[in-house]
Image (cartoon, rainbow, N blue to C red):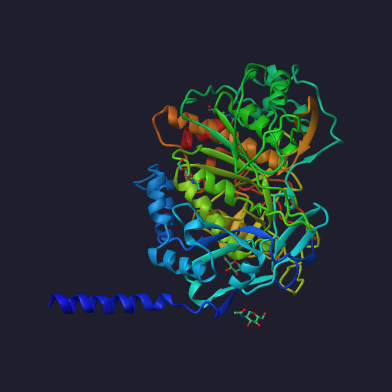
Amino acid sequence: MLLSSVLFLGLLQLAVAKPILKRWDDFDVKHAWVEIPRGWELHAPAPPDHKFNMRIGLKQDRFDDLVTALYEVSDPFHAKYGQHLSKEEVEALVAPHPHTVDVVDSWLSAHGLEPSSAQRENAGSWISITVSVEQASRMLNTTYNVYRHAQADDYVVRTMSYSLPTVLHEHVGVVAPTTYFGTMRSMKATSFLQPDITPIDSDVDVAPKLINPGSLATVPSSCSTTITPACLRALYNTSTYVPTATDKNTLGVAGYLDEFANRADLQTFFQRFRTDAVGGTFTTVQVNGGGDDQNDPGVEANLDIQYTEGISFPTPNVYFSTGGSPPFIPDSNTPTNTNEPYLDWLNFVLNQTSVPQTFTTSYGDDEQTVPFDYATQVCNLFAQLGVRGASIMFSSGDDGVGGGNCQNNDGTRTVRFQPNFPASCPFVTTVGGTIRVNPEVAVSFSGGGFSNYFARPSFQDTAVTTFLNTLGSTNAGLFNTTGRAYPDVAAQGQGFQVVIGGRVASVGGTSASSPTFAGVIALLNDFRLSQGKASLGFLNPIIYSTGINGFNDITSGSNPGCGTNGFTARAGWDPVTGLGTPDFGKLQALIG
Ligand SMILES: *[C@@H]1O[C@H](CO)[C@@H](O)[C@H](O)[C@H]1NC(C)=O
Ligand SMILES: *[C@@H]1O[C@H](CO)[C@@H](O)[C@H](O)[C@H]1NC(C)=O
Ligand SMILES: *[C@@H]1O[C@H](CO)[C@@H](O)[C@H](O)[C@H]1NC(C)=O
Ligand SMILES: CC(=O)N[C@H]1CO[C@H](CO)[C@@H](O)[C@@H]1O
């Protein structure tokens, strides 16, 4: 009996082990482009011995449960509201199934790679392993080339399509670098200098007039041209609030390659525009070799940190400087990092036991240039951060309903509105832009629209269907009526007075709007934490429900693009300014 059961077990193991002998040469296409992504051109074949870090995103075993948990803890009407998950609880939900790990490991082995040499992140759901172009080409049955981005003078090693063995499709979400060409260098910066707006040296005349809250009528007309923290604090009704939960509350700014937040410039900024904050500082966290060159202040980085601090002071602010090796240098065989946008940063932050309660990021790209599989995996990582209790703000983009010729890249060249990613990810809160005061109106570049990748989440059903019903047939066929609609909210986006290298310059873009909105959310989180409550976490379910009357509705202006007038701001939610700009006092009463 004993013997035979041992034998039987042995047979069983054989039977179980057998499927591991997969056919690794039986390929199905995972993703393919019809044409080279816009802005890039074929430069040369990739050298076969060029080495790079391959990232493999595995299917997360219980991801549906994670999304369920996210909506429960973010829904103000749910019993679990505010009961955010710990790092360990999240990891239990996102870890790949052991069978997935086995199959992928045996695929790596079959190609001569040592599975134990792989770096595993995010509960093992991301694998990073060094491969040569030659190895990767065989693994993915593809051809790697060097492509050049002329405008950014950036070179990358990518492919026009890639395949995976059929048996791997149910286990692997995405492999990178493959068909996603975006790099932080080539991506649209969502801030720009505005030399036509004459900067001001200080606002000593204006600031004292702005101390009284609840007096929007008195916001001086200068705030229509030049924006300082005093303008924003008055406009958004935060000027009398004094943060107290500064031992618990943190605001994080995600910064990338070559963008360094400058400490001396922040002091100059405070001396000019927020004298009570002089001496206030921020922490720089260097991710994946990110730098901190204090001789090289970045416009985006200084804008972000000066305005998150300008509003949230004395809340501790953290600037994440995410690095990456230099870009691929053609005709050299130095191994290069692949500078995957978002992945390094997200996996780093998710690996911390506690995360900042509020984040802002000001980067984005046309959704259609981000392969669906890649966008989905990155969007899922934002869900993980949300369920941990973080509110994540993204700028909505600076091209209205679409920049350039707005042609689809599927070979048809059909002109359609072009949504932005990650703005289109339902798990982030997307911030559009406004200008002027008394009243605020939509700024014409404010990115807005409807995703072609992500379906409309139920939290915005009422708001968006109301808008669509009023819209009628305007722009019909140019956008996806069932897609996740954005922006969710808005804030000022032009004429920001920013100190760069000791001098004040005017800066605009929705990347000014995102840190502004994040500053207000950090104050709300401060208020909640000081009351012994949980942080707000994933914001969208609450701002579209109990918080909906905490915004100044923006009802005029539009976001033209793609040869059209775009959408028009109107009463209620609209795809130009979302629900509107924040009124801290009202939000404090509604969701504080
Ligand atoms: C995650 O954090 C742990 C503990 O701090 C550290 O040992 C590990 O190297 C980190 N993992 C990654 C992939 O950064
Ligand atoms: C429209 O959005 C849905 C998701 O809501 C998506 O499944 C569909 O493919 C999109 N249609 C087009 C034409 O992109
Ligand atoms: C500002 O907030 C206060 C509550 O703190 C509120 O009473 C007031 O109406 C708000 N002001 C404006 C102009 O919305
Ligand atoms: C295993 C393998 O390499 N299979 C195929 C990959 O794709 C080319 C065509 O591009 C085929 O010729 C190979 O047989």
At 84% across and 33% down in the image, what residue appears? Answer: 197
Visible residue check, residue 438: no
Image coords of residue 421 (percent x, y): 64, 55
* Closer to the camera in the image, 425 or 462: 425
Image coords of residue 556 (percent x, y): 71, 46
* Closer to the camera in the image, 108 or 464: 108
* Closer to the camera in the image, 444 or 90: 90
Q: Is residue 457 above or below residue 143?
A: above
At 70% across and 53% down in the image, what residue appears? Answer: 183
Visible residue check, residue 227: yes
Instruction: Please tell me in which quarter of the rendered image ligand 4 is found.
Output: bottom right
Image coords of residue 240 (percent x, y): 57, 21
Q: Is residue 571 above or below residue 137?
A: above
Dividing the picture into quadrants, the one containing residue 140 is bottom right
Image coords of residue 538 (percent x, y): 49, 46
* Closer to the camera in the image, 499 or 22: 22
Q: Is residue 281 above or below residue 52?
A: above
Badge count: 0
Quadrant of the frame with the N terminus = bottom left
